[in-house]
Image (cartoon, rainbow, N blue to C red):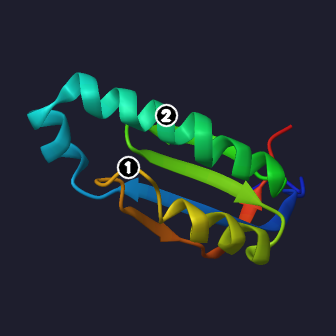
Amino acid sequence: MSGERIQRRLAAILASDVVGYSRLMGEDEVGTLAALKTLHRELIDPKVRERCGHLVKTTGDGALVEFASVVDAVHLSLPCGVTTLPWAAVVRGVPPSSVVEKE
């Protein structure tokens, strides 16, 4: 192992997932994708910006969002669990994590 020091910082990572996404895609792929796009555009993306979050990755129905504060992550997760889309129950987790910074 080299003597190079790895830069780390503490961050809150919000992990979200739409409940029943595979079933919904099987029932109505076009409608589910349109509703998910609407959910991101009208609710999730504005709230991430409002709380100074950074969208790290999306995977179909899932998303990883990084925050400097657990408080900001929780404030984002609460309104996103209640939406106007009847099927969009969102599972969330907010573990404080050590993040390795890339150069």
Q: Residue furthest front?
A: 84
Residues tagged 2 and 1 counted as in contact (Cβ below 8 A):
yes
Q: Which residue is drawn at 60% across and 39% down?
A: 42
- Is 54 placed left or right of 76 in the picture? right
| Location of residue 11 (image quadrant) | bottom right
Residue 85 percent across, percent down from the top left: 38, 49
The residue lying toward the viewer, choosing from 63 and 3, is: 63
Q: What residue type is labelled 2?
A: Thr
Q: What element carries label 2?
A: helix
Can residue 54 be spotted in the picture? no
Which disc is residue 38 wearing?
2
| Location of residue 99 (image quadrant) | bottom right
Q: Residue at x 38, y 43 (%)?
A: 61
| Location of residue 94 (image quadrant) | bottom right
The residue lying toward the viewer, choosing from 83 and 73, is: 83
Q: Name the residue under label 1.
A: 85
